[in-house]
Image (cartoon, rainbow, N blue to C red):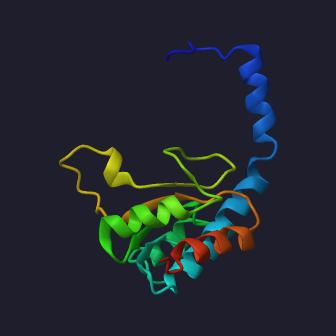
Amino acid sequence: TIGGAIAAPFNAWLTLRGIRSLAPRMEVHCRNALALALFLEAHPAIAAVLYPGLPSHPSHSIAQRQMRAFGGVLSVRCRGGRSAALDIASRLELFTIATSLGGVESLVEHRHSIESADTTTPDDLLRVSVGVEHIEDLTGDWRQALAPHG
């Protein structure tokens, strides 16, 4: 690895510091992701929500047996294709457009745009890493981004 086999003291301290709050952060990530997935699944501008915590997910029963919670990442397929997905992502205010996972902040990305030309990722798909912000703020952000704009 780039950092070698042994972490520097400061890096080790940062890791220990973060691990202390990992369990409660993961609880909030998972709870927020499920709530956002349910909200988006019911919205007419969304064609599909891919999240194993939803009963509509094809692997939901397997996920229920294997997982205590369903994670903080979901994918959303937007009605209207690529242009709709890009438009929705650009209107989100609390979700930062970025390629990353595992932070406490909420992120969204249009995978198709950053992959190679022969990608199999649908161009109407947004990947969402749901953070630990208040769920009403997160759903409110999506509500305003999905609202018809003139």
Q: Position of residue 17 (x, y in %)?
A: 81, 34
Q: Residue at x 55, y 47 (%)?
A: 101
Q: Position of residue 2 (x, y in %)?
A: 51, 15
Residue 46 lies in quadrant:
bottom left
Q: Position of residue 62 (x, y in %)?
A: 46, 72
Residue extending farthest to the left is 118
Q: Nearer the viewer, residue 71 or 39?
A: 39
Q: Is residue 17 above or below residue 51?
A: above
Q: Position of residue 4 (x, y in %)?
A: 56, 12
Q: Is residue 12 above or below residue 110?
A: above
Q: Residue at x 76, y 28 (%)?
A: 14
Q: Nearer the viewer, residue 107 or 3?
A: 107
Residue 87 lies in quadrant:
bottom left
Q: Residue at x 65, y 59 (%)?
A: 94
Residue extending farthest to the front is 150
Q: Nearer the viewer, residue 111 or 86?
A: 86
* Position of residue 124 in the picture relative to residue 120 (left or right): right
Q: Residue at x 29, y 58 (%)?
A: 121
Residue 106 lies in quadrant:
bottom right
Q: Nearer the viewer, residue 111 or 91?
A: 91
* Position of residue 34 in the picture relative to residue 41 (left or right): right
Count the labels in the image.
0
